[in-house]
Image (spheres, grey):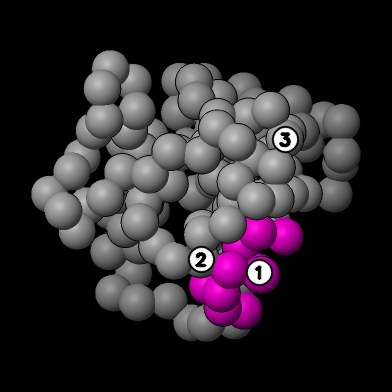
C-alpha cells in the first residue's frame, strides 16, 4: 500500500484472496480514504465494506490512468524499485525474502534522505 505522496507499507501475505487483502486494507486505510487499485478480483467489494471512494485502473483494458490523478503509478514505482534491487541477487532465499522486502520498503520511504545519517542516528539510539 502506498499513501499518495507518502510512505509505502509492505507485508508478505499468504495468498491474494479478497478476505486477506481486505483485512490488510481495513487495518491500514481510513474508511474515508480514496483507494486506487488495479482490476484484481481481491479488491472486489471494498465499497460494500465502506470504502466508497474505491477507483480501479484496469490494466487489462489498456488503462493506465483515469482522469487527472487517478492512477497507481506510485505503487508500481515501488515494485519496479524492488525488482531492480533484487536482480543483483539473482534470486533470494524464501526465508530471507521478507528482510529484503522490508529493507527496500525502508530505502523507498527514505529515498530522498541521507541513509547514512539515518542509520547512524538509529545506531546511536539503539546500540548493538
Residue 79: image x %, image y %? 36, 51
Nearer to us in this view, 82 or 63? 63
Determine crowd level at label 2: few under 14, some 14-19, many 20+ residues with C-alpha closer than 10 A. Answer: some
Q: Are marks 2 and 3 in contact (CB under 8 Å)?
A: no
Residue 23: image x %, image y %? 72, 60
Tell me which label, 2 or 1, sits earlier in the chain: 1
Residue 80 counted in the magenta span: no
Residue 44: image x %, image y %? 51, 59
Query: Which mark, residue 42?
Result: 2
- What is the CA distance from the residue labelled 2 to the residue labelled 3? 18 Å
Residue at (87, 31) in percent of width and height: 125
Residue at (52, 82) in percent of width and height: 94
Residue 21 counted in the magenta span: yes
User: Most extreme residue toward the bottom, as rendered?
Assistant: 94
Tell me which label, 2 or 3, sits earlier in the chain: 3
Quadrant in the picture for residue 64: top left
- What is the CA distance from the residue labelled 2 to the residue labelled 1? 8 Å
**SS type, badge 3:** loop
The residue that label 1 is drawn on is 20
**Side of 60 relative to 118 (left or right):** left
Query: Which mark, residue 4?
Result: none
The residue that label 3 is drawn on is 31
* Residue 57 in view here: yes
Determine crowd level at label 3: few under 14, some 14-19, many 20+ residues with C-alpha closer than 10 A. Answer: some
Residue at (65, 51) in percent of width and height: 48
What segment is highlighted magenta in the picture? 14-23
Amino acid at each position: 500500500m502506498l499513501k499518495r505522496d507518502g510512505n509505502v507499507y509492505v507485508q508478505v501475505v499468504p495468498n491474494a484472496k479478497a478476505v486477506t487483502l481486505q483485512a490488510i486494507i481495513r487495518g491500514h486505510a481510513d474508511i474515508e480514504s480514496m483507494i486506487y487499485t488495479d482490476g484484481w478480483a481481491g479488491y472486489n467489494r471494498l465499497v460494500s465494506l465502506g470504502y466508497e471512494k474505491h477507483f480501479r485502473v484496469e490494466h487489462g483494458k489498456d488503462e493506465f490512468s483515469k482522469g487527472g490523478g487517478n492512477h497507481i503509478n506510485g505503487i508500481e514505482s515501488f515494485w519496479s524499485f524492488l525488482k531492480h534491487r533484487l536482480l543483483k541477487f539473482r534470486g533470494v532465499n524464501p526465508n530471507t525474502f521478507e528482510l529484503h522486502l522490508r529493507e527496500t520498503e525502508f530505502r523507498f520511504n527514505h529515498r530522498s534522505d541521507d541513509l547514512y545519517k539515518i542509520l547512524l542516528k538509529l545506531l546511536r539510539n539503539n546500540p548493538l
